Image (tube, rainbow, N blue to C red):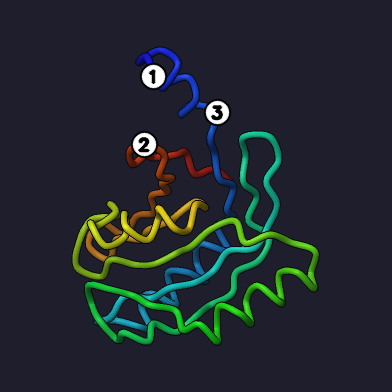
Amino acid sequence: MDDCHYSSRIDLQKISITESQKKILVNHADNEKPNESCAILFGKIEAQKTLVKEIFLTKNIDESPINFTISNEELIKVYKIADEKNMQVVGIFHSHPNSDAYPSNTDKKFMFSNPVVWIIYSGIAKNFKAYTLESDIIEILIEE
């Protein structure tokens, strides 16, 4: 893929999440410290923009500051709720309590099998970043 085509595609990808939704995620991250927190994002995908409509807070069964796992039972429940609400699972959120908001090697492995937008919150920098995985990690724009 040539660089010109690659960068123009990145510019079109966005995720829309409100300030109040971000506050819910920050509170969840703070409440789960020192461990990573996690959540599933429901919404719609329109053209090259992902719209977050609802957040489903989940439990990190790893109870780890460097990894997260959502139980299979909780995932089944999440997909059932999304279906009942006529929404899609459009994103996965988790926090990095002690590092930057950039996908770890473990995150990259799971991004491959969960091809949605991944939003990471850094407990150090207190910021959100969003990524997708195509042939490589691509940072995408977060907007309100």
| Mark positioned earlier in the residue sequence (3 or 1) | 1
Distance from disc 1 to disc 2, alpha carbons, whole Å, reads: 10 Å
Q: Position of residue 44 (x, y in %)?
A: 70, 52
In the picture, the quarter occupied by the N terminus is top left
| CA distance for labels 2 and 3 | 17 Å
Residue, x 39% and y 82% (percent of image)? Answer: 60
Instruction: Work out whether residue 134 or residue 91 is closer to the camera in this orientation and state it.
Output: 134
Residue 76 drawn at (x, y percent): 61, 80
Is disc 1 surrounded by few (<14), some (14 to 19) or many (20+) residues within 10 Å? Answer: few
Residue occupying image coordinates x 40% and y 44%: 133
Residue on which the image places disc 2: 135
Mark 2, residues whose alpha carbon is within 10 Å: few (<14), some, or many (≥20)?
few
Asked if residue 12 lies left or right of residue 35, the reply is right
- Classify residue 86 as left or right of residue 10: right
Say if mark 1 contacts mark 2, CB within 8 Å. yes
Q: Could you tell which of marks 1 and 2 lies nearer the N-terminus?
A: 1
Dot 1 corresponds to which residue?
1
